[in-house]
């Protein structure tokens, strides 16, 4: 979520593989707990990493991909979440808020850069019940494990591990 760091990443990519033809943004950070207990500094960080970071990555990608700027066009894919629609009550509403921002940003940017040869999409996976979620349900004093999770958001998958770090992928032509 630091403009200079993202710009430097793209400069490094320019010199090693050339201008990207695809950029995928999947970084996120979230707090944990009921809304009234969230630390405002942590909420700000969550929104900065999850939403503003996507803005910064897309800006650098557009500067290189846009036919208006001499690029060959390309694709930007932002990872959202079903949390943007469900709100993640009692667990991480800041994350849901930031993913909602990603959805809105994706829509606006797609319309803005379509004529410049850039396609922008978002993918919003549904909930995957992991040990992380089990611990959250237990800490909140709600029993039922996977069934309790499903009651919050409908259908969900089950997994063994959650992604542990942010990912940005770019590809050269």
Image (tube, helix red, strand yellow):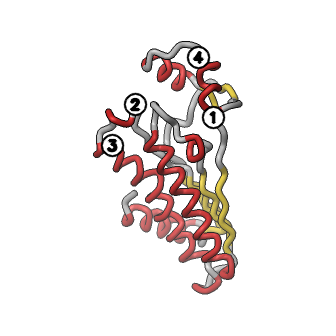
Q: In this view, does 147 lie above or below 23?
A: above
Badge 2 element: loop
Disc 1 marks which residue?
A: 127
Q: Where is residue 108 in the image (x, y as percent from the top left)?
A: 58, 69
Instruction: Identify the residue shown where x is 48% and y is 46%.
Output: 28
Q: Give me the C-alpha separation between circle 3 and circle 4.
A: 27 Å
Q: Residue at x 59, y 63 (%)?
A: 106
The answer to whether residue 146 is above or below residue 51 is above
Q: Name the residue under label 2.
A: 33
CB-based contact (under 8 Å), mark 4 and mark 1: no
* Residue 103 location, quadrant: bottom right
Which residue ends up furthest to the top in the rendered image? 143
Q: Residues within 10 Å of mark 4 (few under 14, many from 20)?
A: some
Label 4 close to label 2 by CB (< 8 Å): no
Q: First in sequence: mark 3 or mark 2?
A: 2
Disc 4: which residue = 145
Residue depth check, mark 3 versus mark 2: number of the one nearer the observer: 2
Q: Residue 43: which quarter of the image? A: top left
Q: Which of 72 and 107 is in front in this view?
A: 107
| Marks 1 and 2, how far apart at CA | 17 Å
Of helix, strand and loop, which one carries label 1?
A: loop
Question: Of callouts 3 and 4, which one flags the residue occurring earlier in the amino acid sequence?
Answer: 3
Image spot of residue 95 (x, y percent): 47, 44
Provide residue 55's location: percent of width, then percent of height.
Answer: 49, 64
Looking at the image, is mark 3 or mark 4 nearer the viewer?
4
Q: How far apart are marks 4 and 1 (CA)?
A: 14 Å
Q: Front-most of 123 and 71?
A: 123
List the residue tagged with mark 3. 42
Q: Is mark 3 on a helix, strand or loop?
A: helix
């Amino acid at each position: 979520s630091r403009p200079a760091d993202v710009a430097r990443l793209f400069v490094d990519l320019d010199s090693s593989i050339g201008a990207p033809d695809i950029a995928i943004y999947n970084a996120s950070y979230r707090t944990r707990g009921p809304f009234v207990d969230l630390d405002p500094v942590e909420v700000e960080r969550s929104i900065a990493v999850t939403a503003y970071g996507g803005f910064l990555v897309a800006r650098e990608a557009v500067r290189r991909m846009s036919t208006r700027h001499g690029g060959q066009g390309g694709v930007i894919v932002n990872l959202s979440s079903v949390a943007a629609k469900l709100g993640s009550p009692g667990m991480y509403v800041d994350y849901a808020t930031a993913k909602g921002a990603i959805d809105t940003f994706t829509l606006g940017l797609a319309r803005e850069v379509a004529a410049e040869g850039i396609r922008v999409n978002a993918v919003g996976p549904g909930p995957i019940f992991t040990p992380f979620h089990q611990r959250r349900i237990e800490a909140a004093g709600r029993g039922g494990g996977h069934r309790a999770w499903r009651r919050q958001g409908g259908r969900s998958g089950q997994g063994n591990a959650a992604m542990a770090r942010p990912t940005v992928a770019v590809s050269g032509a």
